[in-house]
Image (cartoon, rainbow, N blue to C red):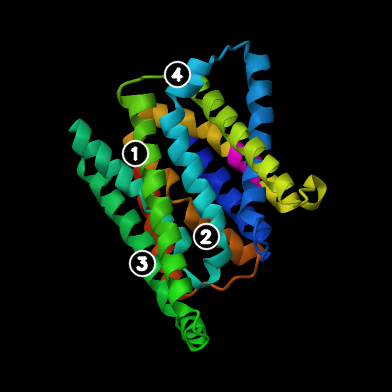
Amino acid sequence: MWIAMTLLTFLCWGIADLFYKIGNRDEGEYNHLKTGIMVGLVMGIHATIFLILNHTNITLIDILKYLPVSFFYISSMVIGYRGLKYLELSISSPVQNTSGVITALLLLIFFHESFDYPFYIAVVLIFIGIFSLSLIQIKENKEKRIEYKKNNKWSKVFALTILFPLVYCVLDGAGTFLDGIYLDKLSLINEDTALVAYEYTFLIYGLVTWIYLRSKKQAFNIPKEKPKLLAALFETAGQFFYVYAMSGNATISAPIVGSYCVLSMLLSRVFLKEKLTKKEYIAIALVLIGIVILAIMDI
């Protein structure tokens, strides 16, 4: 069951990433905050419906208990939304998604797990594929870097394009590592409680951010933010599957889930008409082969 949940998370978050890109194309200063508000609202609604349908109770203690995980995840996502503004001239998506491989390695080191050789081969393939995508994007954006350098904007842009994905990678990797401990290795919390605690924490963040935007006299019109709404819906669906994926086998789930960037790249090629080179297709193929190997290991 957990491998199915893992693949569903991969699918939902890959689609969500596509809509995040569409919804953050504008140059608005508060665009990333509006994305966070939308995700918080959708997650809050889902958490409430989930509690009612499942007759589940949650306490403030549960939310505080899971707060370290929620903090790392929400922080990484807000950083990721901000970095989308610079995505065309950055290595954001591939670098960010190396966090899944890093998490798997941390779980191996701290919990002294051992797997058959196919696992290590798969992880290496995924890492090589995602790292290659990073290098390819750096090379392909050479002309844009030269243009920004001529306009004396390069130092700031370079710092932002490197800083955002690296900070995201560290925060998300830490969150996923803690999730592996909470849900799988030490079973500190059950899946339902973790899901609701995280989603209500995101709702609180969304409400606080909405109040902040109101103080800045910034309008937030949900009907006009359809791409952000769709991104939030798929993000929330992915989060639902994710907690069950991580509770089954976090060490294998983490690198698969963390590879959703390859799906978003393929979807961008189809729906946004973004061009992919042969080298990028090869790198994506390596990641997909690694994912297939990990999935087969559970059969």
Image: 48 above or below 250: above
Kindly identify the amino acid type of the residue bearing the numbered disc 3: Ser
The residue sitting at 27% across, 54% down in the picture is 124
The residue sitting at 46% across, 36% down in the picture is 71
CA gap, disc 2 and disc 1:
27 Å
Q: Which residue is mark 1?
A: 252
Q: Is residue 166 visible?
A: yes
Image: 45 above or below 150: above
Is residue 235 magenta-colored? yes
The answer to the question of whether label 3 and label 2 lie on touching residues, with beta carbons closer than 8 A, is no
Kindly identify the amino acid type of the residue bearing the numbered disc 1: Ile
Task: Tell me residue 129's x, y (percent).
Answer: 36, 61
The residue sitting at 63% across, 50% down in the picture is 33
Q: Which residue is mark 3?
A: 132
Q: Residue furthest front?
A: 215
Kindly identify the amino acid type of the residue bearing the numbered disc 2: Gly
Q: Residues within 10 Å of mark 2 (few under 14, many from 20)?
A: many
Label located before the other in sequence (4 or 1): 4
The residue sitting at 53% across, 39% down in the picture is 8
Foreground label between 4 and 1: 4
Task: Tell me residue 107's x, y (percent).
Answer: 26, 37
Kindly identify the amino acid type of the residue bearing the numbered disc 4: Asn
Label located before the other in sequence (2 or 1): 2
Q: Which residue is mark 2?
A: 83
Q: Which residue is mark 4?
A: 190
The answer to the question of whether label 3 and label 1 lie on touching residues, with beta carbons closer than 8 A, is no
* Range shown magenta: 231-236
The answer to the question of whether label 4 and label 2 lie on touching residues, with beta carbons closer than 8 A, is no
Q: Is residue 2 visible?
A: no
